[in-house]
Amino acid sequence: MPKQGHFAKSTRVKQLNNFKAKRHASGATIADDQLTDFLVVRFALTAKKRVPKVAQESTQRFLIEIGGALIGENGDLSKIVPARLKKVNAQVPWQFFKQIVDNWALLQKFLVKEVPAVPLTKQLLVKNQLTTAELGRAVAQLLAQKVAAISLVNQHQSAGAKQKQLAQMLMTTICPAGHLDWAKVKALLGPLPYTPDPALDQPTREWLTQLSQQE
């Protein structure tokens, strides 16, 4: 699985894409650490083609993030998703989150259907689903915090209180009436430079750079 705070390496993603689903004999099970592999293969065979091509990489990467936490959090998406969004927030451009929100209904439907069907030793169910609006609000909070942190990067004393206050103000700007406004997100984050984490592998950095240049 990817290291804490890092996406899976591009080679790992490629291995999953090329992985051939093995036929399981009746009653056969897979190890818990194969859950993500199994889900990525099922996603490639079923739902991935319904995701716009430009968003397929982001959606699959987020599936890998979720897959790595499903067993530990007992399938609770209300715990898994906010934590995984926060984990990748420092590494991805805002366009990543837009693609995830835009395709969340499809991805969540896939998880609800496919996770219980994975032949684990103990069946795993997906619970506490998130609506697209709820996901959007969670993303809005992270983006507001990011802009606030960048805006006050040179502040020292009392920066924490100022950052919290500014983040709250930005939240009302980009998420009026509880609905994420991507045009306002772009207006705030678009002018800010984006540079991928140099610790990431080169193909991942190239993908993130290309993603940051999308409208």
Image: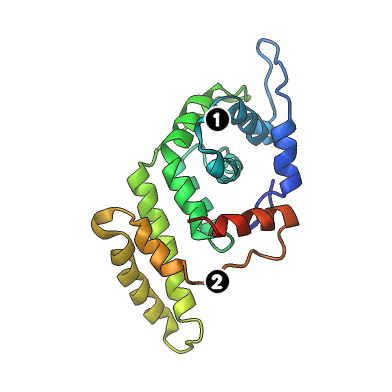
Name the amino acid type tagged 2: Pro
Looking at the rendered structure, which numbered label has been put on residue 193? 2
Could you tell me residue 59's position as x and y percent? 54, 42
Relative to 60, 18 lies left or right? right
Could you tell me residue 147's position as x and y percent? 44, 71
Relative to 27, 95 lies left or right? left
Looking at the rendered structure, which numbered label has been put on residue 14? none
Residue shown at 48%/36% (left/top)?
A: 107
Judging depth in this view, the residue of 201 and 130 nearest the camera is: 201
Residue shown at 45%/81% (left/top)?
A: 152
| Crowdedness near tag 2: few (<14), some (14–19) or many (≥20) residues, C-alpha within 10 Å | few
Could you tell me residue 174's position as x and y percent? 33, 62
Q: Image quadrant of residue 105?
A: top left
Name the amino acid type tagged 1: Lys
Q: Are marks 1 and 2 in contact (CB under 8 Å)?
A: no
Identify the residue position indicated by label 1 in the image. 49
